[in-house]
Amino acid sequence: MKLRVAVQMDPIEHIKIAGDSTFALMLEAQARGHELFVYGAEQLSLRDNKLTARVRPVQVRDEVGNHATLGEEFRTEMSAFDVVLMRQDPPFDLAYITASHLLERIQPKVLVVNDPFHVRNAPEKILVTEFPDLMPPTLISRDRAEIEAFRAEHGDIVMKPLYGNGGASVFKVTRRDPNFGSLFDLFSATFREPWVCQRFLPEVVQGDKRIILVDGVAAGAVNRVPSGDDIRSNMVRGGAAEATDLSPREKEICETIGPALKRMGLIFVGIDVIDGNLTEINVTSPTGIRAIKRLGGPDLAITIWDAIETNRKERA
């Protein structure tokens, strides 16, 4: 089946292809004979209830510095595509939320991955709280008294913005940390939303495992080990990628959350697990599939496209 595929993403000219999951998906789509087009979320327009975008056809190559050839830009109705990949990076802000509302207008005729309704209504640091038995103790609040009580109960904690991404603004705060007041003031001035506070898991030095679920089934994983002077294991923050297998506890986590993810139309999901504790469910623009392949694991771009094509056939 030849599909017309539109990829909503950040400018393709500026991506780092070695670790970019969106690029891996595009390479696989092209290998299957699908037509590829790219555009940015800011190029969407809704007029008289018809959603259009200024798109450009694209051909991709796995060559650093020569990875994309773009055709002439043109405006088209988004309903002309078979599949739309919603892959722009967060922040999860009003612009992101608006794009999800707009893409809902072309469903169910067009398969949008991941389903924009559930991406919008299940932010990754909130969706995870539906599974409290799998998580470390967690508080979502911007109330100082609540945060101080949580800190008094659990000692060392991690504070991070609710809608943050890529490990940005993630801080470890100790039980008697003299910087807590200043950090609270900084968060209050910088972020309008509540913050996530979690009991610090010292086992993070052994790694923060990214597990990819495809259509609700665990498909591969990579262990991300933080550098010696950082608690953050995100590879964009200097974390080192290691090959890994799933423990029985991690398989249990995936089997518990998988049916819910599939029901919500979240085809490509990345979860984060530290020492058997589920910390995040990433649904906006998950990463990790190139690292998994590079370390000898499966090529999950194939698995994801198999799932996309199956879902598309079922809709047709």
Image: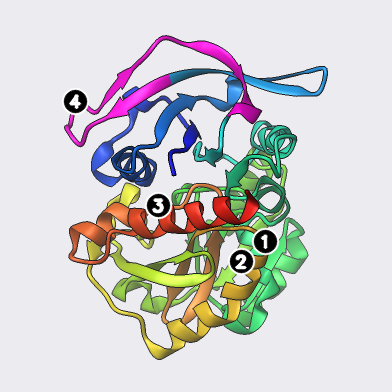
Give the residue pinned by disc 3. 287
Image: magenta residue range? 57-80
> Callout 4: helix, strand or loop?
loop
Q: Residue 315 at x, y = what percent?
A: 64, 52
Q: Which residue is rendered at x = 44% and y = 49% of the image?
A: 166
Asked whether the beta carbons under mark 4 and mark 2 sit within 8 Å of each other, the answer is no
Mark 3 residue type? Thr
Q: Position of residue 195 (x, y in %)?
A: 66, 56
Residue 264 lies left or right of residue 174; in this view the side is: right
For the residues labelled 4 and 1, the Cα–Cα distance comes to 37 Å
Hey, what amino acid is under mark 1?
Met
Q: Is there a contact, CB below 8 Å, between mark 1 and mark 2?
A: yes
Q: Secondary structure at mark 1?
A: loop
How far apart are the alpha carbons under marks 1 and 2? 5 Å
- Secondary structure of the residue carrying tag 3 is loop
Q: Dot 1 surroundings within 10 Å: few (below 14), some, or many (20 or more)?
A: some
Q: Nearer the viewer, residue 150 or 313?
A: 313
- Residue 107, x across and y down, in percent: 71, 41
Residue at mark 4:
65
Res 84 → quadrant: top right
Amino acid at the residue labelled 4: Gly
Nearest-to-viewer mark from 4 and 1? 1
The residue pinned by badge 2 equals 261
In space, the residues marked 3 and 4 are separated at their CA atoms by: 21 Å
The tag on residue 264 is: 1
- Given residues 6 and 21, the one toward you in this image is 6
